[in-house]
Amino acid sequence: MSLSFGKSESLRDAYGRALLELGEKDPRLVVMDADLAGSTRTVLFGQKYPDRFFDVGVMEPTMMSIAAGLALQGRTVFASTFAVFAAGQAYNFVRQSICYNHANVKIVATHGGLLVGADGGTHQIVEDIGLMRGLPGMTVIVPADGPSTRAATFAVAEHEGPAYVRLTRENLPTVTDGTFRIGKAAELRSGSDLTIVAVGALVARALEVAEELSGIGISTRVLDLASVKPFDAPALLKAARETGAILVLEEHSVLTGVGALVAATTSENYPVPVRRVGVPDLFGESGEPWALLDRFGMSKERIREEAWELLRGRGKVQ
Amino acid sequence: MTYAAQSGHPGGSLSVTDILTALVFHELRIDPARLDWPDRDRLVLSKGHASPALYAALSLRGFLPREELASFRQFGSRLQGHVDRAKLPCIEASTGCLGQGIGMAVGMALDARLRGSAYRTYAVIGDGECQAGPTWEALMAGGHYRLANLVVILDRNGLETDGPTESIMGIEPIGDKFRAFRYHTLEIDGHSFPAILDALAEAKRTTTGPTAIVAKTVKGKGVSFMEGKHQYHGKPPNREEAERALRELGTELGRPA
């Protein structure tokens, strides 16, 4: 009942390498960072294209304004820092300088969620997807692995308008085929009894639980909802119609994240039972990254229990 | 405009009017017929609440019809309460929430440098805005990159919403602060056209880094009962006040600019 995934890979490295290719393709592309270039891997771009790389130091809000000023002159600008600074510290600068101005800035935020680990709750932002999703005109992407991070980086570069891409610090196993399209969900596993919708680091756990359930004859569909905004409503509603219940997994606050999005969308269009596994209304804390996911309610046991609850409601299990 | 809208910011619009007039009519290389001219000079009104002054100047310069000024702050208008480039394309950057305009201007100045364009970028900021941390982040960046194509003009009218800047959260000595941030700094009378134009000319001759112009102004300039009164920061005049104000400014109600 164990799955073997593709190799584990750093999403940040995939991003940094994708930037190198983009920098070669588009000589006007500019990359910015706020004193975390080694961690976000924009350093790779900076080494190859020093003239088009601006590490502005610890001024995340103003990095967003400078990025907007550059982008309004017809440039594609990538701006990176940790998610807590990009979405938290700089929120109103992302809102006004970038989104209100329709500036073509791609914010690629690393270190989203609890998997930041030892740094603790100050740095583990679990509200960023909600904050960014609420901004008019903002595209929001949460890739699940290295190959889809690479594809998402190219996709947002191609897309005209602001985007927020949330990456995780930890290496993640390869679970997708490396294709990604804005607005499209990836069906990673077909199934008819239950759907698990997941994003980011929890997509692998969704696949593991689906595999376990297949051992007792339960057929579980797994949707990777990496494109959180715009999201693939047809795929979601098709899953609701065909499987009758949806479990959502996200390393983010359940109050404002993907679970809230799925629950609202189904209840307005095709109501089915939806359960949300994610971070409760709490700040994180220091700890071993993967153990933190377990401690904050995203363990595989918990996922199994929630799946069981939904299956029992549908009369699929006792 | 603020009377017609019965909202808006007359005080800080009147204090910055001479500065914007000098920029829009003399300094900026801009052309109403070529909004997307790549080498046009860029103006960022970081104190976006002074929008009436900029709309009026741009209108007289041919960027928008004068009749449109009456739509200021009305639903469906291109003349938003705070300047909005998505609605009004001759605006270079939407502003309003303070402390963001200089950063965008720095981005524009960097763009000019990267592509070897001679265009210059002007950021007009308010003095209350100098209390905002990101104003100093952005000033630091302009100084660090030695952006000689960037000019920051401070409308130093001395008053913010709740009262005098120096009693609320003092920003002095502001000139020294700009100097410490590597700006060639000039302190002038912001209601003297020769002084404004001289300062702008000196900024152009300054090739080692950015220039900051501290323009000493009077809030509510030109309207006796508004001058020096913080109460008119965000409060429009009533009918009687509007009539009196326009009489003092040599025009009358209902007559476009």
Image (cartoon, coloured by chain):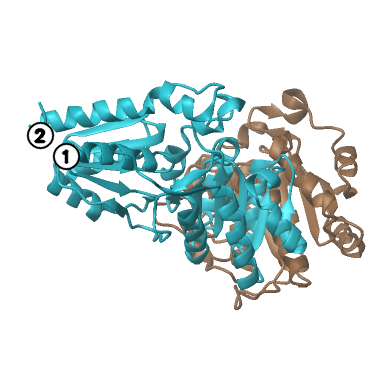
Chain colours: A cyan, B brown
Element type at mark 1: loop
- Residue B4, relative to residue B168: is it above or below? below
Given the image, on which type of amino acid does mark 2 rest? Lys
Q: Which chain carries label 1?
A: A
Residue situated furthest front in the rendering: A1
Q: Earlier in the sequence, mark 1 or mark 2?
A: 1
Given the image, on which type of amino acid does mark 1 rest? Ile
- The label shown at residue A114 is none
Element type at mark 2: loop
Determine which residue is flagged by label 1.
Answer: A218
Badge 2 crowding class, 10 Å Cα cut-off, few under 14, some 14 to 19, many 20 or more, is: some
Residue nearer the viewer, A156 or A10 = A10
Residue A247 located left or right of residue B158: left
**Residue in the picture at 46% in, 43% down:** A132
**Residue in the picture at 70% in, 52% down:** A43
> What is the x, y in percent for residue B117?
76, 72
Determine which residue is flagged by label 2.
Answer: A316
Assess whether mark 2 and mark 1 are in contact (beta carbons under 8 angstroms): yes
Tell how many labels: 2
> What is the x, y in percent for residue A251?
42, 34
